[in-house]
């Protein structure tokens, strides 16, 4: 199996899907986007600054009732107009882009999404199991993004540094549940529990939890666990 590779933390004048963008900064990086014909959408709290020529409006999401019942946002915000806009999350980490081809899909852990071009659809599913133990039984959500146009961009935020590994068919990797960010939909995931004996206190045990991923496909991981602290 290949060793995970560190993704670039700085990007200048990258153009894809009709959008030019820049990623700058050290501890809390900023995504700058130069908008022309292709709008982008985002969660409203990640907006840092914008040109006055850009208007912000509401973009309803598919499955509004399902999202409302799950306690998730029913709407996101989107851009209208030409100009520059910048986004950042309130946390130290790593901002990066995933360039999507037509009909390409990617699964993303909740709270990692930053922005996407308007032709990228956004749905979600709740995952039970490990999250029931770690998050008080509420579960966690995986967002699935699908590119409906010829090409699109998805921008994500990772905590700490972000690495990517590509698994060949049948290859597997075990990850701490809070360490992964995204995966190709071709990559399967299962939850494993490993009991550890506490030395001479044989009746006392602690338990490790892993997410096991099986290829083929790419997986992104972050060096700071989402569950840390």
Image (spheres, helix red, strand yellow):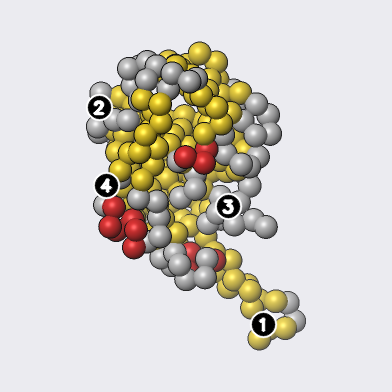
150 with respect to 129 (left or right): left
Q: CA distance from mark 4 to mark 1?
A: 47 Å
**The C terminus: image quadrant:** bottom right
Nearest to viewer (mark 2 / mark 1): 2
For label 3, the residue is: 226
Q: Secondary structure at mark 4?
A: loop
Query: What is the quadrant of residue 145 in the picture?
Result: top left
Horizontal arrangement in the rendering, residue 65 relative to residue 222 (left or right): left
Q: Earlier in the sequence, mark 4 or mark 2?
A: 4
Q: Which mark is residue 184?
A: none
- Mark 4 or mark 2, whichever is nearer to me: 4
Mark 3 Cα-neighbour bin, 10 Å: few <14, some 14–19, many ≥20? some
Q: CA distance from mark 2 to mark 3?
A: 31 Å
Per the image, the residue denoted by label 1 is 204
The percent position of residue 176, horizontal first and vertical second, equals 56, 55
CA separation in Å, label 4 and label 2: 17 Å
Return the residue at label 4.
Answer: 62
Contact check, label 2 and label 1, Cβ < 8 Å: no
Mark 1 neighbour class, 10 Å CA radius: few under 14, some 14 to 19, many 20 or more: few
Mark yes or no: residue 8 visible. Answer: no
* Residue projecting furthest to the right: 200
Label 2 to label 1: alpha-carbon separation:
55 Å
- Which residue is label 2 attached to? 149
- Hey, which quadrant is residue 19 in on the image? top left
Q: Nearer the viewer, residue 42 or 106?
A: 42
């Amino acid at each position: 199996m290949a060793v995970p590779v560190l993704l670039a933390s700085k990007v200048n004048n990258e153009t894809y899907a009709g959008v030019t963008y820049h990623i700058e900064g050290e501890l809390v990086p900023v995504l700058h986007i130069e908008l022309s014909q292709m709008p982008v959408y985002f969660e409203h709290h990640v907006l840092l600054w914008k040109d006055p020529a850009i208007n912000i409006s509401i973009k309803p999401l598919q499955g509004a009732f399902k999202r409302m019942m799950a306690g998730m946002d029913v709407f996101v915000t989107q851009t209208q107009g030409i100009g520059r806009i910048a986004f950042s999350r309130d946390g130290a980490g790593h901002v990066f882009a995933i360039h999507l081809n037509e009909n390409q899909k990617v699964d993303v852990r909740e709270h990692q999404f930053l922005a996407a071009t308007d032709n990228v659809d956004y749905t979600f599913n709740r995952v039970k199991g490990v999250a029931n133990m770690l998050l008080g039984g509420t579960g966690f959500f995986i967002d699935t993004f699908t590119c409906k146009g010829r090409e699109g961009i998805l921008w994500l935020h990772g905590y700490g540094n972000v690495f990517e590994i590509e698994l060949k068919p049948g290859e597997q990797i075990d990850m701490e549940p809070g360490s992964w960010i995204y995966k190709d939909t071709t990559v399967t995931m299962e939850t494993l529990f490993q009991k550890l004996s506490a030395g001479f206190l044989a009746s006392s045990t602690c338990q490790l939890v892993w997410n096991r991923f099986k290829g083929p496909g790419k997986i992104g991981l972050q060096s700071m666990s989402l569950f840390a602290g």
